[in-house]
Amino acid sequence: MPTVLASVSCRSGAKGNTKCRHTISSLAKIAPPVRFRPHVLRSASNEGHRRCTVLFFLHPLLTMADAVTARADDYSQWYLDVVREAELADYSPVRGCMTIRPRGYALWERMQDTLDEMFKETGHENAYFPLFVPQSFLEREAEHVEGFAKEVALVTHSRLIESEDEDEGGLVPDPESELGEPLVVRPTSETVIWNKYADWIQSYRDLPLLINQWANVVRWEMRTRLFLRTTEFLWQEGHTAHATREGAEEETRRMLEVYRTFAEEYMAMPVLAGVKTASERFPGAVDTYCIEALMQDGKALQAGTSHFLGQNFAKAFDCTFANQDNEEEYVWATSWGVSTRLIGGLIMTHSDDQGLVLPPKLAPTQVVIVPIYFDDDQQADVMDRADALLEELSDAGIRAKLDDRDTQRPGWKFAEHELQGVPVRLGLGPRDLENGTVELARRDQDGKENVAQEGLADTLADTLADVQQGLFDQAKARREERTRVVDDYDAFQEAIAEGGFVWAHWDGTEETEARIQDETKATIRLVPLPGEAEREPGEGMLSGKPSEGRVLFAQAY
RNA sequence: CGGGGCGUGGCGCAGUCCGGCAGCGCGCAUCGUUCGGGACGAUGAGGUCCCCGGUUCAAAUCCGGGCGCCCCGACCA
């Protein structure tokens, strides 16, 4: 059935029902693949003239893609279309907040399970700290308060009462219930956590303290974007305490590597690791490490951060320990986190104009079986076989699903699973029962092939591994293609305008960093870690002053 | 906070200039025919036209005021 793309009123005042040919033909030229037909919705008689409305329809064969805007046409709209059509998230009544729908949350759960296991393997335990932070806590660390003060939500009252103002009506905060000290809804938990760590840590025997929490946080951002930047988001924040500087620094790097492994091996999203410059550093950190990924539109996305906090929070919350010589020392700290933003990164790394594309390791459903039948007898046979295959796959540890809805037709299901990013789809019909085959379609490739039912679990395990690797390789190739090395500022500006990563020499001063950002909107994404990229000395492209090595620039989300 | 756009059944929109029965497509429900890449027919349900006030015999439409959302920028994970 055709989908209406648009309807346009003809105001030419031509006579007759469908006689507005001038308007119709000129509009038709605009979008040749679009079919149209004039449809008179209203023809109000007006001194002999008639008005009509022209409805535009998409040709039925084109409707498969009509739900998702093409990336080349409008990347931003494409992203929103994918999120909506794949039913990952929806807007909420509160500006900047989102509802994470079951399909999106299942993805997050996959990420959580994987990361949580990695955290446990590196010796961390989970705990939970409160949502509310006394305002005064935030004020303890000078840089921290400066960094977050402008984006916190405040709780000032504990009760509502009926408004006495007749005009206003409704409920108002009860003045009697005003809090003695306002509470901040946590934008991050360093302060509440270090307040407790000060109690819990007395001796070097209590160290290291390795704790993680899964939580929601709130940052009142000016402009939001589903998953990438929302007012409230879900994340994980690790907070560790160490006896030595080296211990904390090691932890910072260790967790950065955990993030890198997760991004590359599970999300199939290649990343570069490095250190942030002072201007991009976490408020209150000594060093902020990060992994950066490149999205398909050439913009960078910070995918995870790990901070070496030095003794800043220990000093702010007076957290000391007695060392082996019974001398009192401040504790060394780290914190590290990734958030639901990763889902946005995942979408923008792999998905295409047909919708979501998910790497098999994180896909809630890895394989979907679509039964095909023409009558009741066939249905029984096909369903029997499909059930058996489903069991075989499940037993082999593959997350498989049988789409047994008899309310939708196969073609409809194909399109839906494609839109929702299921990595592998199997078609099973009467023909396959005869031949002992199934029809296999990979989400990352066009076309389909017939494979034997015999040994299907093994075949699929290979296919899924191949899809996983293929997505990573493809993403990496895309990144390499859009990474440039430049020496002078003209070439730099040109490269940034084209989008992508740009390696360039920087003289290390905040002035040039600010000027570059001002003029090109590019920021320094990272100073590479040793071994991450070739480091050869050179001259800052603006000042000509010495540079130890190129740093990575890009426009970022 | 600046710039732009938009508020009309679940979704996408027409209707607003020029006031006169609130419409179209999708979706949804029921029945039938269908089913290897988004099927078709028939019937049907579904609306405070963002809110408040004004003008008028009559307001989705005109006038005044308010609210909300989306997109683009500055700020940020």
Image (cartoon, rainbow, N blue to C red):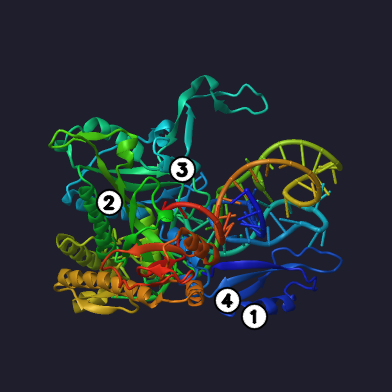
- Would you name the residue on which mark 1 appears? A29
- Viewer-side label of 2, 1: 2
Which residue in the structure is indicated by mark 3? A146
Q: Residues within 10 Å of mark 1 (few under 14, many from 20)?
A: few
Labels 4 and 3 in the same subunit: yes
Q: Measured along the vertical axis of the image, is residue A278 above or below residue A535? A: above
For marks 4 and 3, give the CA distance: 54 Å
Label 1 amino acid? Lys
A199 sits to left or right of A206: right
Q: Quadrant of residue A320?
A: top left
The reply to whether dot 4 and dot 2 touch (C-beta < 8 Å) is no
Pointer 4 residue? A34
Tags 4 and 3 in contact by the CB under 8 Å rule? no
Secondary structure, mark 2, is: helix
Q: Earlier in the sequence, mark 1 or mark 3?
A: 1
How many marks can you see?
A: 4
Q: Earlier in the sequence, mark 4 or mark 2?
A: 4
Chain-order first, disc 3 or disc 2 = 2
Marks 4, 3: nearer the viewer: 3
Looking at the picture, which amino acid does disc 3 mark?
Glu
Q: Badges 3 and 2: C-beta atoms under 8 Å apart?
A: no
* Residue at x-position 38% and y-position 59%: A302
Q: Residues within 10 Å of mark 2 (few under 14, many from 20)?
A: some
The amino acid at mark 4 is: Val
Label 2 sits on residue: A112
